[in-house]
Image (tube, coloured by chain):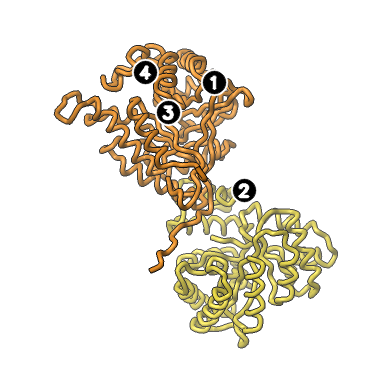
Amino acid sequence: MEIPDIRKKWPARIYTVTIGAGKESGGTRTSTVTIGGETTLPFYLFEGEMPHPPVVAMEVWDIPPEDWPDTVRKPFEDVMSDPGPWAKKCVETYGAQVICLRLKGLDPLLGDRPPDHAARAVRRVLESVGVPLIIWGSGKEDKDNEAFPAVAEAAKGENCLLGTCTQTNYKTMTALATAYGHKLIAESPVDINIAKQVNILAHDSGFPLENLVIFPSTGALGYGIEYVYSIMERTRLAGLGGDRAMAMPMVCDVGAQSWGVKEAKAPSAEWGDPQLRGPLWEATAAYTYLMAGADLLILRHPHAVRAVEAFASQLWRKEGA
Amino acid sequence: MILIGERINAGFKDIGRAIKEKDPRPVIKWAKVQTQAGANYLDVNIGAVSKDPQDLVWLIRVVQEAVPTAISIDSTQPELLEAGVEALDGRPALLNSTTAEDRKLAQVVGLAARCGGALLGVAMDERGSPQDVARRVENGAKIFAAAIEAGLTPDRVFLDPILMPIRFMQDQAPKVLEAIHEFTMLSDPPPHISVGLSNLVSKAKERGLLARTFLVMAMSTGLDAAICDITDPELRMAVATAELILNREIYTDDYVRAFHLKRGAVWNPPDKETDR
């Protein structure tokens, strides 16, 4: 019996987004990363192209985090007091290709630092490492709006990925990203309709769709991962099907979510050695998101980073290679 | 939804005059306006004004220089379609149209297969326009079978069940809706199904309302293309809404804007006064 050829040709391509700018593009980065560009579903290499492998970023904070469990704190214990050395260790010791600097110090409940503290952290990381940066706010919108003009300016011309742009702050964020030469993370609360709406609003303010990365929100393994998975899947199907407002690469904030759940952080050995269990919980969520179409993953534990990069590179190969 | 802009047709006074006087300006204007409105194809028709293939060639060249939009070469004469194909600069084309008459069908299907374009078949035969569902389906199936036989894939075939003026033949619209549904069952995936909306509203007063209401009703039974006045914003709003209700697009609050964005079209909402 002849086996039918079920390969599908999709009408559209996911936008390609490059993060980081070297000297020739007006920045100071010694490397850049490019994500997106798919013409098929994740790792369907028999069917279409996946020109760029998924990228893993490592997370660094502007203040020493108090709520990171010991397992994930340990690898960074000696550097957590300063985002510069912390980022440097991620790159030089753990091979990070991208640093995600999270400006948690802005959060009124975590120190309520002023905007210039955040801007200083940005400069510090830029001086310490050559890899591209994701710069993520505290999640407290009032404080982030107040700080982002200084933050975006501190990284002027570096082509960072700034986050996040939402239904309410899109005017400010698109203006800043345009003025200082950055890309944007478009955030929605596990809601595909809002994901599309944020992109349309950003486009409406004159921001190019091809400079956006979708953040559909992230759930930890066992905590709503299936909802996010199906939204990402549907987003990617729409994007490949020709819906330009859904054709962006996607980012997942896996570390932050994973290390907040008891299965990852419980210190007791009853559920298995926490040194293994935690990174495994984080990595398993990341594998799942890769299958859903994630182009960029933000992780914390070096073991999870190594495992996820190895997994992704096994599944991904450049055409002809 | 595949929307085919109807406006570059010699039946309109400005285009008729443009063809006679070889004045490209009205043609360029309508090519741009319809493209900005999001047309997938621009229908190009020299109608009764001329029988000269060179006039059609001129019209197509003017459109091609003005916009990158695909072209629907509109003529009942296979010889004119052939001349039109010669004028194409390599962009996709829709040969509009053939009927189920043997000689014409063979010629147009052969031309579509050779030029790599799509063809639109109207469900007419040597006896003229059918008044019932069965003959519409019979003619549509005959055209579809001939196209597939010649190597065209279903997505290169458009079938038109033929709309009649509602002002004079009110019993025909429900039959067209039924024929559309029957066409969807010809194959999986089905061919495209298209109507010429201006036939329906001919000589009627509420042209816009009739056109967009029929369009959304027909979309729910399987219509996925129409030759229409794409410059009517309310028609586009109705199509955008129907696509949403049929779950062909992902909902957003600004779905009308999303509809235009997807088509690379410009969207300026109509004045609030007309927005009842």
Residue A120 to residue A159: above or below? above
The kind of secondary structure element at disc 2 is loop
A10 on left or right of B57: left
Residue B88 to residue A119: above or below? below
Residue at 40% x, 47% y: name it. A233
Mark 3 vs mark 1, foreground winner is 3
Q: Earlier in the sequence, mark 3 or mark 4?
A: 3
Mark 2 vs mark 1, foreground winner is 1
B146 on left or right of A262: right
Give the letter of the chain under mark 1: A
Specify the amino acid type for callout 2.
Answer: Val
The answer to whether any part of residue A187 appears in the image is: no
The answer to whether any part of residue B133 appears in the image is: yes
Checking the image for residue B266, the label placed there is 2
The kind of secondary structure element at disc 3 is strand
Give the letter of the chain under mark 3: A
B62 on left or right of B100: right
Do the dots labelled 2 and 3 sit on one chain? Answer: no
Furthest residue to the front? A321
In the rendered image, which quarter is residue A203 located in? top right
Disc 2 crowd, CA 10 A, few/some/many (<14, 14-19, 20+)? some
Residue at 59% x, 24% y: name it. A22
Q: Which chain is orange?
A: A
The alpha-carbon separation of the residues under discs 2 and 1 comes to 34 Å
Circles 2 and 3 in contact, beta carbons < 8 Å: no
Measured as percent of width and height from the top left, residue A261 is found at: 25, 30
**Residue carrying label 3:** A57
The alpha-carbon separation of the residues under discs 2 and 3 comes to 38 Å
Do the dots labelled 2 and 4 sit on one chain? Answer: no
**Residue carrying label 1:** A155
The alpha-carbon separation of the residues under discs 4 and 1 comes to 23 Å
